[in-house]
Image (tube, rainbow, N blue to C red):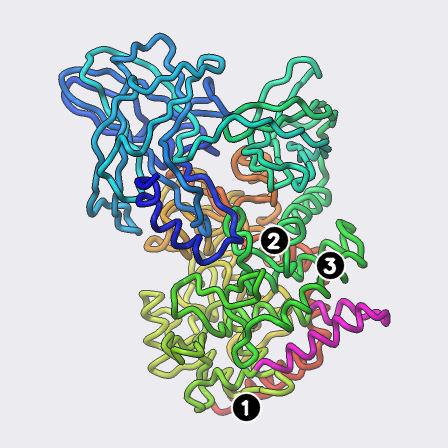
């Protein structure tokens, strides 16, 4: 026990700060979204020894698995040299609370391999360069022979190997890699490994009763639902499918708290039967649930749009933080940490869900009232909210470090874009909706936008202010990027406005400071003075740095703000945004770096999760690493309806097996690296639902633009634009 506490010192420190957060198993391999080479692995060999690999990665096996649908294959030959296969820990955003561990465990399928031929295993801690993955340093434990820890626990040929962490002593770091290597016995072997994790096995306990399940079929997938609150003590839900209602095969596992599992069958016009069981911490299986029969069928374009909107909306409805009703940063991740900007987007997604009939207006109003009451009581900083908020307490959550503990003006503007849209939507005279409007107005009037004019010069707004560190994060907001909405709302404020002149002196500034800022992040002179004018892939770009930047620049500020009505002396922003989207589409269509998958129906470079972490991807050689985010193309529907629809159909029908899931499309994919995100992100799911709706009906644009403060601010900017043009 002493050793395990030392090993997980970091985890236990965080757990001492809060007892609320969900604790995850420290899992190195559960299942792979993609077949072929497993991205989070690395293989090497020398001399007469060998291990089968694909581009120096371990192959994913779809013929053998302990938990469906796959495992890792180790097909090796021990000769007069050596081989190694490392399985790396995939660090997911917000998964930073882990259960105490005392054992390294995995399920092993050996076939007829002798104990002497089984590999050795060791723990490893590696430090790598974040951008390139280059190894800086590593610390390894002693090697342990797997053959010494076979305990006879057999399930259909699979043995549960449990090695005490004390066997690796004196290794005291939290490992981020598990390394398998050859034994001294020469010969060939083929084995399979599944459920590789650091855990504490528990004593045998009675398997919980399996809850009732329901199922709903779509064109090429089926959603399995259960009551998550009815599942206590289970590690997984295990889902079974049958094509003939007789022979059932396991197709996947899911953490019970999701309450939903998506089975992408890939076929339309098929009838399936489903049932499920529960697995406890010892992988003991419960009795089967009820059986449900469903049939997939072909969908029209309108039905596909409904399907995508509903799945994205679900993130903010079923996946919301429990106490506040607001949006999480990502799922899976921290269950108590609210992302305020994503919450503003999510409020608009809830309105979409209401209008499309996914929920009732009464349900939506009840949720909005809950949100409003929470926001009245949470931490604010001169009226602005922090980037992240702890849901149970309402306190600022400094997720990005101790400096990140104050008001975040950009996230505040994203939140209020959603709140002002809701104020227009909930316009009925009943008590509940009147209270929603009243509280939103109070919150809106409390934001001291002028406070964030740090130097009181009427030029730049500053991103962040901390109550104990002041303006330490000294980041001025300079366009072209996602912060246009911040300047617009600051100008529009009925109580603490900034002068409209800050649009040109700050956001669209052509000062030396602004030009140097744009040159620095764009690594080019193109657009350094806000205006651009160059042609990219045959399309002229009036405004924008480089060739327009990542696509979220044309999404985040324009979920409610209608770009058709945003004009300045340089351009109309619907036309400018459309050109940025078309440049992105043409770049991906031409695919100058020959990335696997890129094409006219597989495009969208923006900010997202990626193989090497979160990054803003742009349509240029320097900033394109092969990572594509579905939100890029799908949130561009108002600008590129034909190209976006082609992307939707291709991503769903041809790539849905790994890219489609419980909340719609997963955050990102990089087929060049054979990597797909395991998470959905709050900032990226809502723009899909919202911008598809703006394309279909203009709903959110119409609602946001009903606010007189917004139209007045746009009038002031347009008046200044006329004067600016004359002056030039």
Question: Could you give the CA–CA distance between mark 3 and mark 1, rounded to whole angstroms?
Answer: 34 Å
Q: Which residue is mark 2?
A: 688
* Upstream in sequence: badge 2 or badge 1: 2
Q: Which residue is mark 1?
A: 723
The foreground one among 471 and 479 is 471
Q: Nearer the viewer, mark 3 or mark 1?
A: 3
Residue 291 location, quadrant = top right
Residue 678, given in percent of the width and then of the height, sits at 49, 42
Q: Are marks 3 and 1 in contact (CB under 8 Å)?
A: no
Query: How dense is the environment of label 3, judged by Cα within 10 Å: few (below 14), some, or many (20 and up)?
Result: few
* Secondary structure category for the residue under label 3: loop
Residue 438 location, quadrant = bottom right
In the figure, 217 relative to 99: above or below?
A: above
Q: Are marks 2 and 3 in contact (CB under 8 Å)?
A: no
Q: Which residue is mark 3?
A: 697
* Secondary structure category for the residue under label 2: helix
* Upstream in sequence: badge 3 or badge 1: 3
Residue at (44, 79) in percent of width and height: 467
Question: Could you give the CA–CA distance between mark 2 and mark 1, rounded to whole angstroms?
Answer: 37 Å
- Side of 543 relative to 183 (left or right): right
Residue span colored magenta: 421-447
In the figure, 445 relative to 428: above or below?
A: below
Residue 8, given in percent of the width and then of the height, sits at 35, 45
- Side of 469 relative to 713 (left or right): left
* Secondary structure category for the residue under label 1: helix
Residue 661, given in percent of the width and then of the height, sits at 58, 39
């Amino acid at each position: 026990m002493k050793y395990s506490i030392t090993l997980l010192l970091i985890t236990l420190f965080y757990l001492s700060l809060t007892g609320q957060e969900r604790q995850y198993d420290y899992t190195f391999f559960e299942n792979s979204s993609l077949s072929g080479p497993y991205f989070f692995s690395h293989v090497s060999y020398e001399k007469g020894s060998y291990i089968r690999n694909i581009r120096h990665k371990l192959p994913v096996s779809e013929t053998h698995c302990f938990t469906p649908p796959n495992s890792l294959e180790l097909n090796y030959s021990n000769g007069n040299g050596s081989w190694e296969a490392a399985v790396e820990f995939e660090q997911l955003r917000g998964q930073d609370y882990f259960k105490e561990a005392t054992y390294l465990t995995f399920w092993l399928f050996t076939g007829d391999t002798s104990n002497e031929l089984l590999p050795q295993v060791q723990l490893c801690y590696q430090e790598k360069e974040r951008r390139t993955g280059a190894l800086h340093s590593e610390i390894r434990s002693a090697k342990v022979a797997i053959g010494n820890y076979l305990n006879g626990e057999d399930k259909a040929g699979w043995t549960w190997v449990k090695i005490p962490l004390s066997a690796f002593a004196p290794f005291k770091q939290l490992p981020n890699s598990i390394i398998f290597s050859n034994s001294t016995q020469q010969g060939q072997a083929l084995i399979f490994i599944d459920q590789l994790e650091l855990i504490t096995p528990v004593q045998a306990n009675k398997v919980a009763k399996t809850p009732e399940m329901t199922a709903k079929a779509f064109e090429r997938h089926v959603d399995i639902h259960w009551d998550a609150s009815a599942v206590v003590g289970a590690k997984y839900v295990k889902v079974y499918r049958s094509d003939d209602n007789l022979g059932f095969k396991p197709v996947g596992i899911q953490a019970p708290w999701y309450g939903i599992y998506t089975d992408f069958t890939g076929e339309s016009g098929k009838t399936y039967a489903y049932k499920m069981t529960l697995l406890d911490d010892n992988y003991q299986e419960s009795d089967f649930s009820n059986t449900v029969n469903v049939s997939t069928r072909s969908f029209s374009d309108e039905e596909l749009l409904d399907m995508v909107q509903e799945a994205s909306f679900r993130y903010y409805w079923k996946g919301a933080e429990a106490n506040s009703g607001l949006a999480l940063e990502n799922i899976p991740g921290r269950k108590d940490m609210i992302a305020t900007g994503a919450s503003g987007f999510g409020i608009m997604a809830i309105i979409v869900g209401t209008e499309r009939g996914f929920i009732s207006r009464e349900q939506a109003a009840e949720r909005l009232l809950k949100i409003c009451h929470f926001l009245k009581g949470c931490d604010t900083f001169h009226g602005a909210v922090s980037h992240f908020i702890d849901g149970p307490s309402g306190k600022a959550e400094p997720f990005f470090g101790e400096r990140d503990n104050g008001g975040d003006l950009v996230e505040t503007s994203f939140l209020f874009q959603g709140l002002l849209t809701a104020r227009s939507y909930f316009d009925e005279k009943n008590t509940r909706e009147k209270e929603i409007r009243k509280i939103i107005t109070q919150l809106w009037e409390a934001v001291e936008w002028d406070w964030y004019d740090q130097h009181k010069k009427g030029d730049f707004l500053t991103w962040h202010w901390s109550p104990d560190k002041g303006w330490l994060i000294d980041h001025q907001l300079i366009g072209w990027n996602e912060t246009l909405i911040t300047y617009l709302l600051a100008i529009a404020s009925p109580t603490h406005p900034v002068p409209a002149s800050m649009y040109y002196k700050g956001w669209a500034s052509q000062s030396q400071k602004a030009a140097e800022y744009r040159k620095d992040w764009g690594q080019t002179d193109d657009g350094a003075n806000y205006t651009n004018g160059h042609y990219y892939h045959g399309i002229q770009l009036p405004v924008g740095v480089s060739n327009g930047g990542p696509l979220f620049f044309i999404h985040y500020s324009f979920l409610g703000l209608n770009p058709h009505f945003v004009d300045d002396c340089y351009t109309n922003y619907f036309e400018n945004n459309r050109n940025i989207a078309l440049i992105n589409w043409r770049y991906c269509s031409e695919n100058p770096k020959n990335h696997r998958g890129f094409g006219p129906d597989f495009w969208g470079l923006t900010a997202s999760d990626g193989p090497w972490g979160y990054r803003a991807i742009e349509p240029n050689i320097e900033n394109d690493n092969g990572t594509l985010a579905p939100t890029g193309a799908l949130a561009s529907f108002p600008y590129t309806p034909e190209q976006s629809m082609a992307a939707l159909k291709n991503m769903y029908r041809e790539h849905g097996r790994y890219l489609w899931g419980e909340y719609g499309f997963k955050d990102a994919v990089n087929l060049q690296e054979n990597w797909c995100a395991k998470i959905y992100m709050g900032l990226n799911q809502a723009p899909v639902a919202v911008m598809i709706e703006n394309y279909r009906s203009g709903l959110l644009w119409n609602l946001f633009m009903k606010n007189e403060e917004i139209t007045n601010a746009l009038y002031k900017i347009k008046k200044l634009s006329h004067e600016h043009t004359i002056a030039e």
